[in-house]
């Protein structure tokens, strides 16, 4: 607290002391100091070398918890995150330049786990068409089970600006690459018509994304169960990919 000048002014006041008063101001200053301290987050010791990454993970964990609790990215503030972690707001900005970057990092971490889930779900399926179908089901279930993360990652323009991967990079990413491989295997086996496997996988993703987006943003539509919707979508999608007889032969 900055001390005010102790010089007396004629007919006026000096600091917290009124002219003619001898009341000690130390107790008042002490009381205000205690009040100020009570509003601050719990003190956190200075991080040792190598602990910066640990703090980053704690920030991501706290943000994820608040996102789930509030059900909205707009309701999660950096101040609330700092209080949950027990650090100061400036400490958060050492790891994330703004709230959009923080929120995106939370959702990106969640979607990295989706890649692992997809790879595990498809690992033991030999039939490429069934792999595509199971991949669509796994993706859709993940999206509706993490609606706010999905909304931020895939549907919110402000946060989605952080995502700048190209289509070629997407094709090699965890999770998406297993769908591309399934499409390629289907083409190689003759179950699917020849074509660009990356473009076909992208089209399937777009179809599933559209379906789960409806489920997330339009819950009152009372659509059929998720599995039934995805089964119908995949059936119609694969029908369009079946080899067709050459009319010239």
Image (cartoon, rainbow, N blue to C red):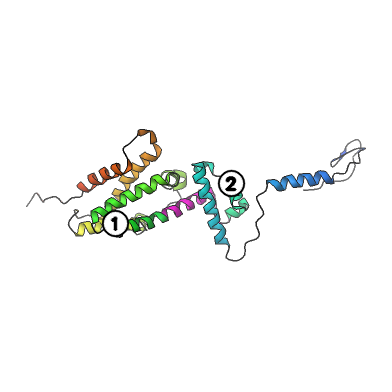
Please, which residue is most extreme toward the bottom here?
49
Q: Residues within 10 Å of mark 1 (few under 14, many from 20)?
A: many
- Camera-nearest residue between 15 and 210: 210
Left or right placement of residue 99 versus residue 151 in this view: right
Q: Position of residue 119 (x, y in %)?
A: 34, 58
- Camera-nearest residue between 94 and 81: 81
Left or right placement of residue 12 versus residue 225 in this view: right
Q: Is residue 170 magenta?
A: no
- Camera-nearest residue between 34 and 161: 34
**Residue 212, picture quadrant:** top left
Residue at 38% in and 58% down: 116
Residue at 72% in and 46% down: 36
Which tag, 1 or 2, sits closer to the chain's start?
Answer: 2
* Labels 1 and 2 touching (C-beta < 8 A): no
Residue at 54% in and 57% down: 56
Per the rendered image, the range of residues in magenta is 94-111
The residue pinned by badge 2 equals: 80
Left or right placement of residue 34 versus residue 134 in this view: right
Chief secondary structure of the magenta portion: helix
Query: Can you see residue 107?
Result: yes
Q: Position of residue 68 (x, y in %)?
A: 49, 45
Q: Position of residue 162 (x, y in %)?
A: 46, 51
Q: Is residue 108 magenta?
A: yes
Query: Can you see residue 199?
Result: no
Please, which residue is most extreme toward the left here?
249
Q: Secondary structure at mark 1?
A: helix
Nearest to viewer (mark 1 / mark 2): 2
Residue at 24% in and 56% down: 128
The residue pinned by badge 1 equals: 180
Q: CA distance from mark 1 to mark 2?
A: 41 Å
Q: Position of residue 191 (x, y in %)?
A: 18, 55
Q: Residues within 10 Å of mark 2 (few under 14, many from 20)?
A: some
């Amino acid at each position: 607290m900055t001390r005010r000048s102790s010089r007396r002014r004629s007919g006026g006041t000096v600091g917290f002391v009124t002219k003619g008063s001898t009341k000690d101001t130390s107790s008042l200053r002490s009381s205000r100091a205690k009040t100020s301290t009570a509003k601050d987050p719990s003190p956190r010791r200075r991080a040792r070398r190598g602990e910066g990454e640990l703090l980053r993970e704690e920030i991501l964990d706290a943000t994820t918890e608040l996102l789930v609790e509030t059900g909205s990215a707009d309701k999660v503030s950096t101040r609330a995150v700092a209080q949950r972690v027990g650090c100061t707001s400036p400490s958060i900005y050492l790891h994330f330049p703004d709230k959009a970057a923080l929120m995106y990092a939370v959702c990106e971490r969640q979607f990295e786990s989706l890649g692992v889930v997809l790879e595990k779900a498809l690992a033991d399926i030999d039939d490429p068409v069934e792999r595509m179908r199971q991949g669509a089901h796994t993706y859709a279930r993940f999206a509706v089970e993490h609606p706010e993360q999905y909304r931020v990652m895939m549907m919110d323009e402000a946060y989605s600006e952080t995502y700048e991967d190209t289509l070629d990079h997407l094709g090699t990413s965890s999770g998406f690459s297993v769908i591309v491989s399934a499409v390629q295997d289907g083409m190689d086996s003759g179950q699917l018509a020849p074509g660009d496997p990356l473009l076909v996988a992208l089209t399937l993703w777009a179809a599933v994304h559209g379906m789960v987006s409806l489920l997330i943003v339009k819950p009152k539509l009372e659509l059929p169960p998720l599995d039934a919707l995805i089964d119908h979508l995949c059936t119609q999608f694969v029908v369009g990919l079946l080899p067709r007889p050459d009319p010239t032969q």
